[in-house]
Image (spheres, rainbow, N blue to C red):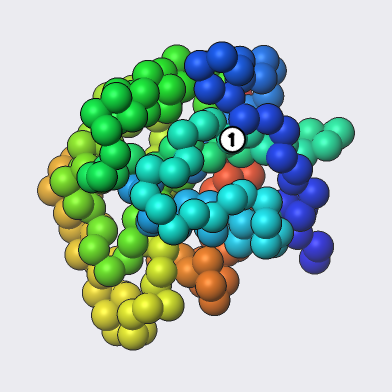
Amino acid sequence: MDNPFKAVRFLVSAAGGSPAPAPDRPEVAFAGRSNAGKSSVLNAICQQHGLARVSKTPGRTQLLNFFEWPEPALGRLVDLPGYGFARVPQAVKSAWGELAGGYLARRECLRGVMLVMDARHPLGETDRQFLIWVQTLQRSCHILLNKADKLSFSVSRNALKQTRQQLSALNAQATVQLFSAVQGTGLEEARGRIVQWLESDGG
């Protein structure tokens, strides 16, 4: 079966002076710490190597990047700036809150958040803060434990088990899976979750 995500195309980057597209289609946002591999995850899901820019410099992406299907449109995917960067000015961190935070809090067509974490050290303090905040916004959240290819099978399964236990302890409603943008682990599960959100009525 052909991958419908291969039809996704870049639409526009939005920042302070560049407005976001009209909220006329359902959207799924990709969030995560800087260098967790968000852009690589998005590229893997869409089976397009250069769809989202990949940077090795934490805090480099400071825009909301919108991608969408051509007509007939399924919806949009939105790549948010990474959070948790340690080596950028406070003004940049504040700008993240205004841009990405404002989007997550007020975007009425947002159906869910794909939260990308590094499987080797998931649920860091900023991840926990972000997760709790997203839950207070009543946003659906699905966690991708990316870079699972860097762990052995048994270690990766244990990381998944421990993350589920920690989510339960936090009373977080988020679901979680293993993922590898390099090896393709978990691709179909992630795509299925995105389609489920985009086809929901938002209620």
- Residue at 54% x, 76% y is 183
Quarter containing the N terminus = bottom right
Total number of numbered labels? 1
- Residue at 29% x, 84% y is 154
For residue 123, above or below residue 199: below
Please indicate, yes or no, whether residue 198 appears anywhere in the rendered image.
Answer: no
Q: Nearer the viewer, residue 172 or 93?
A: 93
Q: Residues within 10 Å of mark 1 (few under 14, many from 20)?
A: many
State which quadrant residue 25 falls in.
Answer: top right
- Residue at 43% x, 22% y is 99
Q: Which residue is mark 1?
A: 65
Q: Secondary structure at mark 1?
A: strand
Q: Residue 38, percent across and down?
A: 47, 52
Q: Residue 161, percent across and down?
A: 25, 67
Please indicate, yes or no, whether residue 182 appears anywhere in the rendered image.
Answer: yes
For residue 19, above or below residue 129: above
Left or right: where 135 falls relative to 3: left
For residue 124, above or below residue 112: below
Q: Residue 19, percent across and down?
A: 61, 15
State which quadrant residue 85 falls in.
Answer: top left
State which quadrant residue 26 falls in.
Answer: top right
Left or right: where 112 falls relative to 20: left
- Residue at 81% x, 62% y is 2
Q: Nearer the viewer, residue 195 or 60?
A: 60
Q: Nearer the viewer, residue 92 or 4?
A: 92
Q: Residue 24, percent across and down?
A: 69, 18
Left or right: where 189 falls relative to 171: right
Q: Amino acid at mark 1?
A: Asn
Work out which residue is located at the far left of the displayed protein and give it. 169
